[in-house]
């Protein structure tokens, strides 16, 4: 298994409590709305995390469909399992660079904000191609430009003032993919009829303090900070809260968000 970015320990619960609705909920609705196939009876979700997209898929798919929701991080799935249960849902730990399912099995593969975190992106896309049935649909998203995602941009700046290197801008990482390179990767993996779209939304959270806590303690960035100096975690979190208040407000805090969404077929 390939693990470049770890969501473990207390991170999954903070991720769910502070970031899911703020950063991911709207994009989850968008990506699931793109799964419109009448034959979507065997669906694979990769990088399911704490189940944001999983919930929407279960609401959208027919009762006769079977959803397999997977993630490389066991801790993320454990949080998801606390609140999601369905008779047509299977959970599994899976590395998308070595998907443990046979060829030509799924009608649809869905992945929200996961491909960008994989070291072997082309290998992952080839694996997705392999497990899709002929004519099967792949739908996934990645973050757009960091400048169009204010909370990420501010977080990147604040963390950069404390650390010499910034884990947010690493590859793999949240902003390691763009439209042109992603389309080329899809072509290299064998996909056809590739469509891309820019999706802009506004994320809202009750307070800047909650946003800062989620951004630092609900993402693996906390591991990089703690490795440098655990005492930096509260200092960076406090500095981020103050900068967020100045730039994005408070009660609630609202941030523009942008994703790139890709649809392609085998």
Image (cartoon, rainbow, N blue to C red):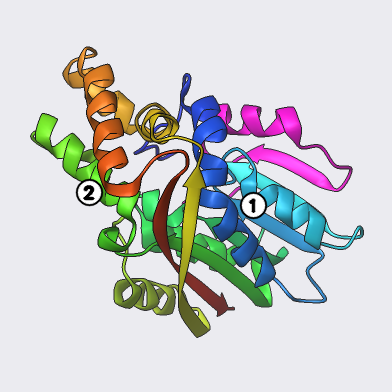
Which element is circle 2 on? helix
82 or 90, nearer to the observer: 82
What number is the disc on residue 169? 2
Q: Is residue 206 above or below residue 132?
A: above
Q: Quadrant of residue 116?
A: bottom left
Q: Residues within 10 Å of mark 2 (few under 14, many from 20)?
A: few
Name the residue at 68% across, 69% down: 33
Query: Which of the marked residues, 2 or 1, is nearer the chain's N terminus?
Result: 1
What number is the disc on residue 125? none
Q: Is residue 71 above or below residue 197?
A: above
Left or right of 165 in this view: 35? right
Q: Farthest bottom residue?
A: 193
Q: Is residue 94 visible?
A: no
Q: Quadrant of residue 5?
A: top left
**Residue 9: x %, y % from top left:** 47, 19
Q: Is residue 28 above or below residue 245?
A: below
Quarter of the picture containing the C terminus is bottom right
Q: Residues within 10 Å of mark 1 (few under 14, many from 20)?
A: many
Q: How many marks?
A: 2
Q: Farthest left residue?
A: 164
**Residue 130: x %, y % from top left:** 58, 66
Name the residue at 62% across, 44% down: 70
Name the residue at 62% across, 33% down: 77
Region in magenta:
72-100
Residue under label 1, please give it: 53
């Amino acid at each position: 298994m390939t693990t470049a970015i770890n969501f473990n320990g207390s991170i999954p619960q903070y991720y769910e409590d502070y970031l899911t609705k703020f950063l991911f909920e709207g994009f989850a609705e968008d990506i699931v709305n793109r799964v419109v196939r009448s034959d979507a009876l065997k669906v694979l979700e990769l990088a399911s995390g704490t189940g944001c997209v999983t919930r929407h898929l279960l609401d959208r798919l027919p009762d006769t469909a079977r959803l397999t929701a997977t993630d490389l991080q066991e801790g993320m799935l454990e949080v998801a399992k606390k609140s999601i249960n369905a008779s047509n849902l299977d959970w599994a730990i899976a590395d998308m660079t070595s998907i443990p399912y046979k060829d030509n099995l799924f009608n649809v593969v869905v992945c929200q904000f996961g491909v960008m975190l994989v070291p072997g992106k082309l290998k992952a896309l080839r694996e997705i191609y392999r497990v899709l049935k002929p004519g099967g649909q792949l739908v996934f998203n990645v973050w757009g430009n960091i400048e169009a995602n204010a909370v990420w941009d501010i977080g990147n700046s604040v963390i950069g003032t404390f650390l010499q290197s910034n884990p947010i801008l690493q590859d793999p990482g949240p902003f390691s993919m763009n439209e042109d390179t992603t389309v080329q990767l899809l072509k290299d993996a064998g996909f056809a009829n590739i469509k891309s779209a820019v999706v802009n939304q506004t994320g809202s959270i009750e307070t800047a303090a909650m946003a800062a806590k989620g951004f630092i303690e609900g993402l693996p960035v906390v591991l990089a900070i703690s490795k440098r100096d655990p005492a930096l975690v509260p200092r960076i979190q406090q500095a981020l809260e103050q900068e967020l208040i100045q730039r994005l407000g408070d009660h609630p805090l609202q941030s523009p968000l942008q994703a790139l969404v890709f649809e392609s077929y085998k």
